[in-house]
Amino acid sequence: MRKTNIPAIQTIFLGGIARLLPILLCCVLAASAQAPAPDSPQIEAKAHALLAKLTLEQKIELLGGVDSMFTHAVPTIDLPRFKMSDGPLGVRTWGPTTAYAGGAALAATWDPALARKVGEGLGHDARARGVHVLLGPGVNIARSPLAGRNFEYFSEDPFLNAAMVVPYIEGVQSQGVIATVKHFALNNQEYNRHNASSDVDERTMREIYLPAFEAAVTRAHVDAVMNSYNLINGVHATQNAFLNLKVLKGEWGFKGILMSDWDATYDGVAAANNGLDLEMPSSRFMNATVLLAAVKDGSVKESTLDDKVLRLLRTEMRYGFLDRPQFDPADSPYSVPDRAIALDGARESITLLKNDGHLLPLDSSKIKTIAVIGPNAYPAVTGGGGSSYAHAFEPVSILTGIANFVGPNVHVLYSRGLPEFTDVIQRTHWENGVKVDVYPSTDFTGTPETYTEPRIEAGNPGRRHSGGEVTRSIRYTASYKADKAGRYVLVATCPTWSHEAFTLIVDGKPLPAPPRAEGQAPQSAILDLNAGQTIEVSVEYLPDSPTARLSVGIAYEPDLISEDVRKIAADADVVVVAAGFDEPTEGEGFDRTFELPWGQAALIDAVTAANPHTIVTLTGGGGMETRSWLGKVPALLHAYYPGQEGGTAVAEVLFGKRNPEGKLPVSFDRSWNENPSAPYYYPIKGADTSLHVTEVGKPPVDYVIPHVKYDDKLMVGYRYWTTTGKHPLFPFGFGLSYTTFNFSNLQVPASAQSGSTVTVSFSVTNTGNVAGAEVAQLYVSDPSATVKRPERELKGFEKVRLDPGETKHVTLTLDARAFSYWDELAHKWTIENGKFVIRVGDSSENTPIHADLTLN
Ligand code: BGC
C-alpha cells in the first residue's frame, strides 16, 4: 500500500491546520476503505432498505448509465452517481495519466506479481481521479493476429490469461476500485463487431474462450463484467441467457454488476430477462417506456429488476462508496511510483526473437554512432487505438530512450525514414485530376453529381455536402502514370474510428482486402508498373459523415525512403529500425493487416543494404509479416505496446543493462494464411441471418447477422502447431536471453489419484555468464485420451531469476482442471484416467524434460 505520503502533505500544509483537516479526513476515510468488504448481513439489510424506498421508475432509471461514464444518482436516497473510466492500459478517460504496458505486453512478462502491481497502480490512478469503476481488463483470446484489440487483451492461451488477469483484478480492487472484466464473450475480432455472431461449440467455449472470465469471477472476485458487442451462437451477448444466466451468474456465482458495452444493447426486455444489469452509456432499451410496460404486462418481473438494483447497491456498499469519497488526495494523478511500474512492464515484456552472432547486447563503449530510424522511433508509440488509448504525461520514445541511455559520448542519428501519410497524398500527381461522382444513394445508384478535384484527400469533396443525413456513395476515378519501372505503393486510409468503408480498384479489378464493416484499417498495395504505364485507379467510398474523410495516394516505392536514410545508416556503427503498428493502424473497431504498414518493409530493406548491423524493433499486438526481410536482419525485438516507458526499456535491453526476459504470448506466424483461424476468421458466405430491432421512438431496424464459424475449434495458436507437428516462425512461449538456461531433475509421481492435486518439481540453472530470468513452462499432454485433445496445453509456469551458475528448484502444483477436458455430452469437466505426459521447457516447442504420470 502506498498511503505513506501523508506526512509530506502535512509538511506542505503545516501553516494551515484548518485547511489540512478535510484532506486528512479524506485520507483516513479512504485508507480505511480499501479492498471491498465481504458480503455481510448488514450490507444485505441496508441494500434492501434502500431498495424499499425506490419507486419502480427510480429502479429502472438505475439500470442505465448517464453522461457517457456515470451511473445514475438517486438524490431521494442519497445515492450519488458513480464515475467510470476506460482502461485497461491506463485510467484514460479523465486526462493524461500513466500509460502501462498493454495486455499483450503484460502477458509477455509471464509475471503475475507484476500484473498485480499494474492493477494496484491503476487503482491509485483511479482514486486520484475519483473513479469508482475501471473498464478493464480485457481477456479475450488472441485467436488471430489481425484482431484489432489483441494488444489490450493478453494471449492466445486461457491458462496464461487467467494467471495474469487474477492478480491484475485483485490489484485494482485492493485499492477500492471496481475492475470490469471485458468483453464477455467471444470478441475475437473487430470485424462488424455489433452484428457478427461468433458461432462456437460449447467445448471450445469452455476450454479456450471462457476460462479467463471464469478465473476473474471465481478466483479474483471481479465486481463488474462487461458484455461484448457481438452475438454468440446467434444471440447478442447482452441478452444471452446461456452466458449471462447459466454460466456467469449461475455456475460461477457472479454477484456483481453485469454491464453492457457502450451501445451493445439491442432489446430492453430480452436484456432485462437475460442477465444484463446496467445498460451503458444510457438506457436506450432498458428504459421506463419499455420496462414499465413490460412489468405491467408480466413479460419482465419486478423482482428481476430488483435483483439488478440490489447488485448495484450491494457492490457500491461493499466498496464503501456511500460512506467515503472516492477521490483520494494521497494518490497523485502524476505518479512517480506508477512510472516505475510502467517501466517494469516494458522491461519485462520485451522479447528478443533473433540475435545472430550475438549482435546484442551492444557495447556502448565501442559504439561511436548509432542511427535510429523508422516511423515508430519518434514519437513514442505507447498503445494501440481506440477506447484504451492512454495519453501519457511524458512518454519516452525509442529515439529518446536510446539517446538518454547512451549520453553525450555516442552520436545519435535519426530519420523517420518514411514520409507522413499526408505527404504521400499531397505529392501524388493524378493525370487530369480526379473525377468525383457523388451518388445520392449508398450503393452508387442514381444520377451522380460530378466534379473534378486535384487529389483524393480528406475534406475535399465533402465541402460540397456538409450537413444533413449521410446517404451518399462516392466514386473517385483517376489515372496515374508511372515515370519509372518498378514497385509503386498505393495507400489509402479513412478514420478507423467510424463506419466508413472503401474499396480500391485498379484497372477495373478490386484489390484483395479482408471483409470489413464498422472501421476499416488503412490499406496499401504494391503495384509493379512499367515505365510510362498508365493505370486507372478508382475508389468506391461509403462515407458516414457529411465530410468525406478518405485519402488515397500513390508513390514510387524507392522514393518513399527518405534521402538521408541510406547515408545515416551507412555512417552508423549500428542501426535500430523502429517498425510496426501504431494507434491509426491497429486498434478498436477494425481488424489490422498482417503486413507491416506501407513502406516499412522497403525501409528495412534499404537500411540493411546500407548497414548489415541492423536491429529491428516491432510494435504491435502480436505477430506480423517479417519473412520478407528477416533473413537480412541479425537482431529482432518485439516490444508489443510497451506503455509510456517503452523507449527506456528498449534502450536498456539493447545495451544489456537489462537481460531480455519476455516470452511470446502468441504463436508468431510467417503469413496470415498459415494461422489456424485463417480459413474461418471471417463469415461464411451465405450464412447470414437477420435480426429485427425495435427501439422506442425509432423506426424498426433489420440487421444482417454474419456468422463467423469457429471451426478451428480448440486448435488455437500453439495447440494447432504442436498437434499438427508443424512449426510457426516463432513458437508461443519463445524468447531469447543474453544467457542460457538448463532444465533438469524433473520429479513427477508415477501415478496419482484422478482429481487430486499433483505436485511437480524440477530445477532451472543459469548456465551462462550474466544474470537473467527464464520462464519455465509446464505443458500437459493426454496421449491416452479417446476424445481429440490438443497435443499439449500450458498448465503451469514460473519465472525464475538466476545469477550465473545459480540453480533454483521450482515446484508447481497441478489441480484437477489441468488434466480435464469439457465433456460435451455430460456438460462437465472430465478427466479420462490413463497416461499423461508432463513436459517442461522454455517454449511450447522446446520442452527438454518430460515424465509420464498415470491417473487412476
Ligand atoms: C469499448 C469498451 C469501452 C467502452 C467505453 C467501447 O467502445 O468496446 O471497451 O470500455 O467503449 O469507452
Image (spheres, helix red, strand yellow):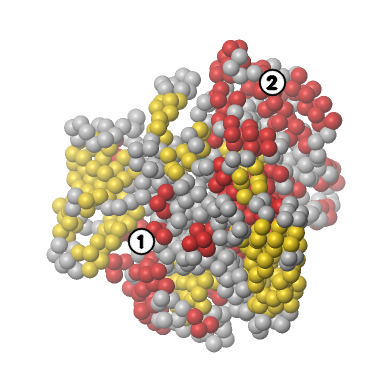
Where is residue 272 drawn, in percent x and y? 60, 25
Residue 245 in view (yes/no): yes
Residue 12 in view (yes/no): no
Pointer 1 residue: 598
Marks 1/2: CA–CA distance: 56 Å
Residue drawn at x 22%, y 51% as measured from the top left: 509
Where is residue 108 drawn, in percent x and y? 59, 62
Near mark 1 (Cα within 10 A), the count class, few <14, some 14-19 or many ≥20, is many
Q: Compared to 508, does 641 lie above or below? A: below
Residue drawn at x 37%, y 53% as measured from the top left: 522
Please identify the quarter of the rendering in which residue 850 is found.
bottom right
Where is residue 134 drawn, in percent x and y? 65, 44
Residue drawn at x 65%, y 72% as measured from the top left: 849
Say left or right for 729 vs 141.
Answer: left
Q: Amino acid at mark 1?
A: Trp
Where is residue 665 drawn, in percent x and y? 57, 61
Q: Nearer the viewer, mark 1 or mark 2?
A: 2
Mark 1 and ligand 1: say if the CB distance to the nearest ligand atom is below 8 Å.
no
Near mark 2 (Cα within 10 A), the count class, few <14, some 14-19 or many ≥20, is few
Q: Compared to 661, does 589 lie above or below? A: above
Q: Quadrant of the C terminus?
A: bottom right
Q: Which mark is residue 670?
A: none
Pointer 2 residue: 303
Taking depth in this image into account, of 145 and 133 the one nearest to the observer is 145
Of the residues under marks 1 and 2, which one precedes in the sequence?
2
| Residue positioned most to the top | 296
Callout 2: SS: helix
Q: Amino acid at mark 2?
A: Ser
Say left or right for 507 vs 288.
Answer: left
